[in-house]
Amino acid sequence: MSIDSPLIQILYWISIGVFGIEFLLRVFVERKLSFLISIDGLVLINQVFFPFYDLRILRLFRLFDIFSQSRFLLPTNTLIKTIIKQRNALLGSQIMVISILLVVSTFIYFLESSVQPDVFGSIPSTMWWGIATLTTVGYGDVVPMTDLGKLLASFTMLVGIGMFALPAAILASAYYEEIQKKNFLVSFEAIASVPLFQELPIGAVGKINEKLQVVLVSEHETIFSKGDEADSMFIIEYGKVKVEIQEPVYLVSGDYFGEMGLLGNALRNATITAADDTKLLELTKSDLAELSEEHPGLFKELELSASSRSQN
């Protein structure tokens, strides 16, 4: 079917109309002409009134909209923050790569220029071989012929593996540290908001945070059953759990449970299941005993809480 056929032309103008309506709706909703909307308007006007200039390639700018729509690619994203913080280390590693590239390109020039003057005739031309070898891509279009040249190529490949692994190691370690810091702050805020710990000094809350272990449970999963040994208590960071007693009770973010068995050295007196996907912070019996020795107020608060719950 020809592009000039009536059917194609009808479909073309229908699509122009659809995109025109979509453009007007976006202007109406956003109440302003952003850069990306302006580009769309320019392309639309061009297609309607000046079809001899094809500006549709400008719609590639629409790809940048993902940076404002996706929380994973915002500048505040942990990965981007990690790259920015480690920019000096990353730049230093790239300077090392460029330096090694210049060194090996110069050496291979002196070793191979007399044997293969067409491909190793100058240091800039040998840099293509240097890049392909350092990155261990090895296209094979340019290869050394002399024994010393082959030895240098082997050495360059081994160095290249290490050089390009260095930025990955820098980013991986820094990213892990950022994630740990973020998790620490989130957990610290969650703990500080729990009424049980609100009267404790900041140092004590920080110590509790260090001892807590994260437990993720899915909906309907049993956390512990009635009659189980009481070896830890739990704090709900987010989600909801169900205490399966005669009249079920639901606990939500900031609540805690499991302390009654710890204080009385008794078995679990109820089955508790997750009513939603839940993140728990677990404090073991030994850690609780250590903290109670340092902060007797914590133990008294737990006793009051357990006594109140047993009466209810």
Image (cartoon, helix red, strand yellow):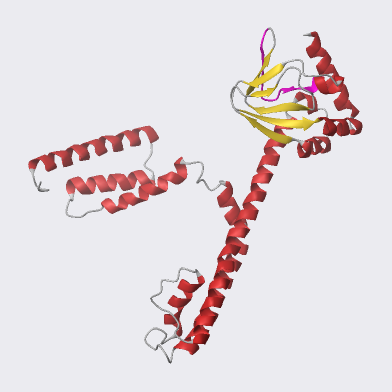
Q: Is residue 112 left or right of residue 20?
A: right
The residue shown at (55%, 70%) is 160
| Depicted 215 relative to depicted 149: above or below | above
Q: Position of residue 132 (x, y in %)?
A: 45, 72
Q: Position of residue 269 (x, y in %)?
A: 77, 15
Q: Is residue 122 left or right of residue 19?
A: right
Q: Which residues are magenta?
A: 247-260
Q: Position of residue 84 (x, y in %)?
A: 58, 56
Q: Nearer the viewer, residue 234 or 63?
A: 234
Q: Nearer the viewer, residue 153 or 33?
A: 153
Location of the C terminus by quadrant is top right
Q: Position of residue 189 (x, y in %)?
A: 71, 34
| Depicted 235 relative to depicted 62: above or below | above
The residue shown at (42%, 85%) is 120
- Direction bottom: furthest residue: 114
Q: Is residue 252 magenta?
A: yes
Q: Nearer the viewer, residue 75 or 289?
A: 289
Please count the marks in the image.
Answer: 0
| Depicted 178 relative to depicted 231: above or below | below
The residue shown at (83%, 22%) is 302
Residue 196 visible in image: yes
Q: Quadrant of residue 170?
A: bottom right
Q: Nearer the viewer, residue 145 or 169?
A: 145
